[in-house]
C-alpha cells in the first residue's frame, strides 16, 4: 500500500500540475485577443478578458489563465511587424520554446511575417496552425445588396486561397482553419480542436479537451470520456486506501474522494455557478434559463450527508459496515476493503459523471439550441 498510493497520487497530480501553454500570434488587428476570450468562454467586457481593439493593444506576451483550470494558459503575443516588434527582434524575445503549440491568426491573407513565424516554429519542432479569422464578416459583406451566396463554395475559395498563399511562400502542407471568433460552433472550430488533440501528448491532450468551452454536446461527450479516466484513478486510490486495516478509515477517505471528484467533474462540465454565468453571457441568455434545465442535486454544496442520502448510499453504508467488521481479521479485511472501496467509488463516480453529463448537455442545448444528434454529425468544412 505504501508503494502503490504515491504512484496513483502522482498520476492524479500529473493532471493537476501539468501546464498547457497555448500561444496565439499574428499581425495587429487579426483578432488574437478576441479568439483567446472565445476559447476561455468570455466576452470582451467580462472580468479578466483579454483587451481587444483595432490597434495593437498587446505590448508584451500576456498570459491569461483558464477560468476553471489554473494550469492552462493562453498567451496573447504582440503582433509582429510593428515598430516595437520588427520581425528580426520578435523571434528572439518571445521565448517560443515555452509554448506547447502556436496559433497564427490572420484576418485576410497570410503575410511574409506569418511565414517567418511558421518557419521558426518548424525549426523549433513546434506545432503551429493557421487560422483565417472573421469569416462571418466576409460572408456578410458578400451578401450585401441581396446577393445570393453559396456559402460552401465561398468558404472553399477562402480556404484554397490561404493554402495556396502559404504553399507559395514555402510552407508545403499548411493546416488552415476558417473561424468566427463570435460563433465558434460555425465553420472549422471542431476540425481545429481535433487537429490539436491529435498532436498533443496524452496528459496535455486531456487537459486541452477539458479546457474547451461547452459549445455543443460533442464537446461535452469528449469531456466525459476524459473524466472517465479520472474515475478509474480515484477508484483505484480509494481501493488502495481501503486496504488499510484501520476501522472506518476507508469510509472517511471514500467520502473525501467522492466529494472532491464531484466538485472537479462539475467544474470541468461547466455546471458550477461561475461557468453557467459565463456561458449565459456568451449565449446572451438569462442565466436562470440555463439553471432551470439542470435537474440534479449535485450542483449545490456537496457534503458527506448528501453523499449518504443519494440513492446508492444504502449500499455504500452496508459495504462499509462489513468492511469495519472484517478489519478485525487483517488479511481478509484488507482484501475485502480494497475491493469494496474500489467498487463503491467507481460505481458512485460513474453514476455522478453520467448524471452531470446529461445535465451539461441540457445546458448547452438551452444556450445554443444545439441538439444531441449534432454530436454524431460531421463538422462543417
Image (cartoon, rainbow, N blue to C red):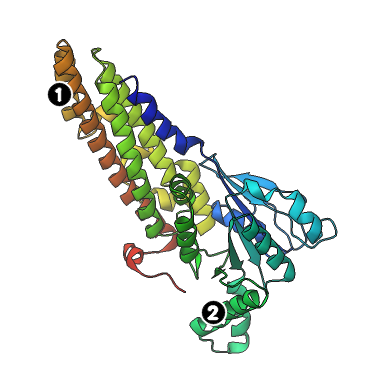
Q: Residue placed farthest to the top in the image?
A: 328
Quarter assignment of residue 106: bottom right
Name the residue rendered at 57%, 80% in the picture: 160
Q: Position of residue 212 (x, y in %)?
A: 48, 52
Q: Position of residue 230 (x, y in %)?
A: 35, 39
5 w.r.t. 126: above or below: above
Q: Earlier in the sequence, mark 2 or mark 1?
A: 2
Q: What element does badge 1 sit on?
A: helix
62 w.r.t. 247: above or below: below
Q: Position of residue 109 (x, y in %)?
A: 68, 75
Name the residue rendered at 21%, 29% in the picture: 313
For label 1, the crowd category at 10 Å Cα-Cα, with few meaning under 14, some 14 to 19 and many 20 or more, is: few
329 w.r.t. 237: above or below: above
Q: Position of residue 3 (x, y in %)?
A: 35, 22
For label 2, the crowd category at 10 Å Cα-Cα, with few meaning under 14, some 14 to 19 and many 20 or more, is: some
Residue that badge 2 annotates = 155
Q: Residue placed farthest to the front in the image?
A: 123
201 w.r.t. 298: above or below: below
Residue that badge 1 annotates = 318
Amino acid at each position: 500500500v505504501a508503494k502503490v498510493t504515491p504512484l496513483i497520487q502522482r498520476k492524479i497530480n500529473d493532471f493537476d500540475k501539468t501546464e498547457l501553454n497555448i500561444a496565439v500570434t499574428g499581425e495587429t488587428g487579426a483578432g488574437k485577443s478576441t479568439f483567446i476570450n472565445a476559447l476561455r468562454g468570455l466576452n470582451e467586457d467580462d472580468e479578466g478578458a483579454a483587451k481587444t481593439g483595432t490597434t495593437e493593444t498587446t505590448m508584451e506576451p500576456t498570459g491569461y489563465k483558464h477560468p476553471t483550470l489554473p494550469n492552462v494558459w493562453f498567451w496573447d503575443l504582440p503582433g509582429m511587424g510593428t515598430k516595437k516588434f520588427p520581425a528580426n527582434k520578435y523571434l528572439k524575445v518571445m521565448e517560443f520554446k515555452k509554448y506547447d503549440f502556436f496559433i497564427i491568426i490572420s484576418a485576410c491573407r497570410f503575410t511574409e511575417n506569418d511565414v517567418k513565424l511558421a518557419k521558426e516554429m518548424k525549426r523549433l519542432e513546434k506545432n503551429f496552425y493557421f487560422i483565417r479569422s472573421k469569416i462571418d464578416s466576409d460572408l456578410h459583406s458578400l451578401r450585401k445588396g441581396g446577393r445570393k451566396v453559396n456559402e460552401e463554395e465561398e468558404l472553399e475559395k477562402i480556404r484554397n486561397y490561404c493554402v495556396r498563399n502559404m504553399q507559395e511562400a514555402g510552407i508545403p502542407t499548411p493546416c488552415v482553419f476558417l473561424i468566427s471568433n463570435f460563433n465558434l460552433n460555425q465553420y472549422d472550430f471542431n476540425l481545429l480542436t481535433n487537429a490539436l488533440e491529435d498532436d498533443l501528448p496524452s496528459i496535455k491532450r486531456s487537459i486541452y479537451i477539458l479546457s474547451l468551452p461547452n459549445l455543443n454536446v460533442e464537446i461535452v461527450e469528449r469531456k466525459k470520456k476524459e473524466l472517465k479516466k479520472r474515475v478509474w484513478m480515484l477508484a483505484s486510490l480509494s481501493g488502495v486506501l481501503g486496504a488499510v486495516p484501520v476501522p472506518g478509515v476507508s469510509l472517511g477517505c471514500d467520502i473525501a474522494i467522492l466529494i472532491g471528484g464531484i466538485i472537479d467533474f462539475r467544474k470541468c462540465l461547466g455546471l458550477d455557478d461561475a461557468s453557467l454565468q459565463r456561458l449565459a453571457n456568451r449565449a446572451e441568455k438569462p442565466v436562470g434559463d440555463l439553471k432551470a434545465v439542470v435537474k440534479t442535486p449535485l450542483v449545490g454544496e456537496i457534503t458527506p450527508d448528501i453523499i449518504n442520502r443519494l440513492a446508492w448510499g444504502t449500499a455504500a453504508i452496508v459495504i462499509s459496515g462489513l468492511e469495519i467488521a472484517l478489519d478485525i481479521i487483517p488479511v481478509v479485511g484488507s482484501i475485502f476493503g480494497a475491493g469494496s472501496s474500489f467498487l463503491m467509488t467507481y460505481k458512485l463516480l460513474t453514476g455522478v459523471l453520467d448524471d452531470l453529463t446529461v445535465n451539461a448537455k441540457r445546458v448547452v442545448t438551452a444556450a445554443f439550441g444545439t441538439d444531441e444528434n449534432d454530436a454524431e454529425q460531421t463538422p462543417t468544412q
